[in-house]
Amino acid sequence: MNTVLDEAARIKYQDPGTVRTILSNTKTIAMVGLSPKSERPSHFVATYLQYEGYRVIPVNPMAKEVLGEKSYPDLLSVPDKIDMVNVFRHPDECPEIAQQAVEIGAKTLWLQLRVVSLEAARIAEEAGLNVIMDRCVKIEHGRYNGSLHWVGMNTEIITARRGRRYF
Amino acid sequence: MNGQTHMAQEKRKFGFETRMLHAGHIPDPVTGARAVPIYQTTSYVFEDTDKAAQLFELKQYGNIYTRINNPTTATFEERIASLENATGAVATASGMAAQMTTMMTLLEPGDEIVSSAHLYGGTVTQFTHTFRKLGITVHFVDPTHIDDWAAAITPKTRALYGETIGNPRGSILDIEALADLAHAHKMPLIVDSTFATPYLCRPIDWGADLVVHSATKFLGGHGNSIAGVVLDSGKFDFSTFSTIADPDPAYHGLKFYETFGHYGFLMKARAVTLRDTGAALSPFNAFLLIQGLETLSLRMERHVQNAQAVAQFLSQHPKVDWVAYAGLPDNEYHALAQKYTPKGPGAIFTFGIKASNPRAAGKEFIESLHLFSHLANVGDARSLVIHPASTTHQQLSDEELAAGGVDAGMIRLSIGLETLEDLLWDLDQALLSTSA
Ligand SMILES: Cc1ncc(COP(=O)(O)O)c(C=O)c1O
């Protein structure tokens, strides 16, 4: 598994069971730093998640609308109930985003691949949120629904049980 | 989902043999088929128009067309990736295609690579002549001297390349030292690990960034399919490596490394290079390779056990001049072999016949063999033999042969899985029947 976290942090913030539970229980995702530009990584992830049935709400003060959803300047302005806050911003901004995630009652704080902030994690954890760090939602979803396998990637899933590529 | 058992399995690091049998394949949810089905199809019906568009933009991972990916091939890819401790793999139509796919993805005209000179002859030809047409220059160095590698690096060098177990003298590549050298110059180390297989050595564990194989050999293992594979450790930082990092005009300015991170190189190798060069593996051959992988450890164990015994037997034979096998204690690569291939340095090696006319003796020897198949391949379950001076190199004089590191009496063996005593018997009777 590709990560910059140490063993202890991996166990805490990348637990496969927690990842699967989050992916199956989440319905609405606020994506902080979602770009309106179609070639940006965040746009790839949002397009994917939207097609897979999640509602993706953009949080980006520079955008009006992304993928048909109105964009908000910050988490506190989002009127809808948010299950997961997914962060595509610099680690320095994460503690404040975590604070807002707590305030709006989100259940999960998910920091993307290479977005690492132990301070943000602490804030969210203390308020009882699930925290995932240095992982990509699209990759993790693809790992368990099988699509990552179709492009030859090592999902690290080993099982002899029938048809288990689901959450 | 069954949360408890899943969480238990996801924390476990399964062993090599378990992954040989299970990685990359989950029994089909519809039919329950236990063996990996052969998806003999060119193309795949799209779920809807949105999904189709997203697949072409690479916003979804999925099946489009078998030149790009195929479910049977994907099982082979994920399985070998798991065995090599790689982040993923791209299968190709041959080992040569795996090398070509790797280089076409990484390099541009004007770029250079520094390579070990101890390579499969076909690779030397590809690197020298075909690459020259693409504007790529390869500098060959003696792999044993790290200083020679360092001296050959220029500002245009983009990668280092070598074989775990090199041709023709069975040299062992100092992967760890070369990985350090490559990384100090911000370039990847690429290793052809065909002769080792992941059972004997995993170059990624020693710092190699990319690994290629001719799966034609031990991975398939039965001499029935031509195939190759490219693997990526996922650890190399391609963020300043222009061919992987820069916007791709063929994908609306998509930046492969920024978008796919540790999958960036492989996504580009598949979605650009494989798509455009067309050297895709057939699903039927992928199925045969999967069958091969399921017994890899058992076969390799016996291959190296037989090879060690044959090498020892030959080294004491009155008709044998020399044996080049790193498993022998007096071999110059023995120490490196103990470090990188502790289970045994493969099953392919060369030896020289003692004779007044070695070229004629080599021919006599080949013609007297009963069990060894005389052909141009290695890594079959059966034992194989070739005498370069009377086949691949027959047009060269003895002096020209010597310059190429091949001597006139040199024989190459690929030791198979037959009864050891039968192999020794066959070699002994053939050696004793040489009169030249
Ligand atoms: C070490 C090595 N690399 C690459 C190749 C090329 O592989 P293929 O014949 O599958 O194209 C071979 C084939 O002999 C080989 O021995």
Image (tube, coloured by chain):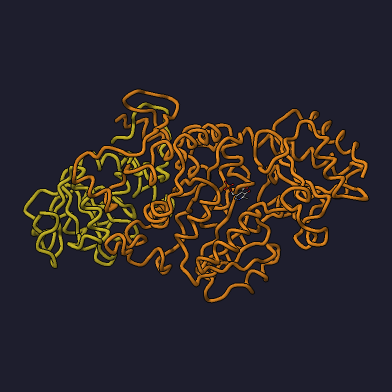
Residue at the image position 42 percent from the left and 57 percent from the top: B265
- Horizontal side, residue A84 vs residue B315: left or right: left
Quadrant containing the N terminus of chain B is top left
Residue at the image position 80 percent from the left and 34 percent from the top: B369
- Horizontal side, residue B264 vs residue A131: left or right: right
User: Residue A18: x and y, percent?
Assistant: 30, 42
Tell which chain the image draws in orange. B
The foreground one among B162 and B403 is B403
The foreground one among A167 and B252 is B252
The foreground one among B257 and B384 is B384
Residue at the image position 65 percent from the left and 59 percent from the top: B174
- Horizontal side, residue B135 vs residue A111: left or right: right
User: Residue B207: x and y, percent?
Assistant: 55, 57
Is B256 drawn above or below residue B112 in the view shown?
Answer: above
Kindly indicate the quadrant of the structure image that contains residue B148. bottom right
User: Residue A161: x and y, percent?
Assistant: 38, 27
Chain A appears in which tint? yellow
Kindly indicate the quadrant of the structure image that contains residue B72. top left
